[in-house]
Amino acid sequence: GGTIKSIINAGNKQTLTFAQGWKLIDYVSQELLVKKCKLPLDVVAYAQLVHCCSAFGPQYTDMKTIKKLYKQMIADGVKPNGLLLNNIAVAGKVKYEYEQNREKADKLAKWIIRQFDKHQIPIAKVLQSRLNNMMAFHDYDMKTIIDRSKFI
């Protein structure tokens, strides 16, 4: 993910177009990993793909693709982890700050917290702070979930 992001944004200057970048991402994930190396996508590969979804800057961060990847991952029987959920949070935070959309940031933060709870994944303190900052409206249910989570 980081390598692909570096290729796309070499020297803080976008070297590939949006379409070329996605062609590269698809090639690495599908052609190299899945077809050529016969490796199924695991949670780390999905986390890196999510990371790539924000490679083109906040205006091009593709939350629909991130949601589609997450649904595909769950359908494939791959359990999320903290890295994947953190990458979703970072992409959403950057996207929704750019758009100045506190409601979508709030909704995403609460969804992420529920995923941590549903899959019994500990929430890192740094991510807890990030999610708290993303929430526009704090409610008791979210506080309860965060309080009972084992922090790392």
Image: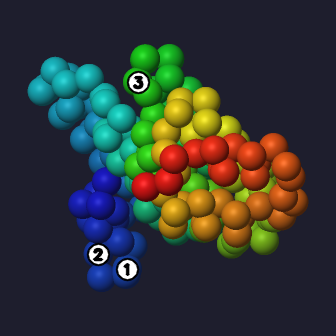
Image quarter where the N terminus lies is bottom left
Label 1 element class: loop
Q: Is residue 149 above or below residue 5?
A: above
Residue 51 image offset from top left, x and y in percent = 42, 54
| Badge 3 or badge 1: first in the primary sequence | 1
| Badge 3 or badge 2: first in the primary sequence | 2
**Residue with the mark numbered 2:** 10
Determine whether, in the image, residue 132 is placed left or right of residue 16: right
Instruction: Please say if the residues under marks 3 and 2 sit with CB atoms less than 8 Å apart.
Output: no
Residue at image x 78%, y 56%?
106
Label 2 element class: helix
Residue 103 image offset from top left, x and y in percent = 84, 58
Q: Is residue 55 above or below residue 29?
A: below
**Residue with the mark numbered 1:** 13
Residue 138 image-quadrant placement: bottom right
| Discs 3/2, front | 3
Determine whether, in the image, residue 96 is placed left or right of residue 80: right
Q: Is residue 114 above or below residue 1?
A: above
Res 78 label: 3
Residue 21 image offset from top left, x and y in percent = 38, 54
Residue at image x 45%, y 46%?
82
Residue at image x 59%, y 60%?
128
| Amino acid identity at mark 3 | Val
Residue at image x 20%, y 32%?
33
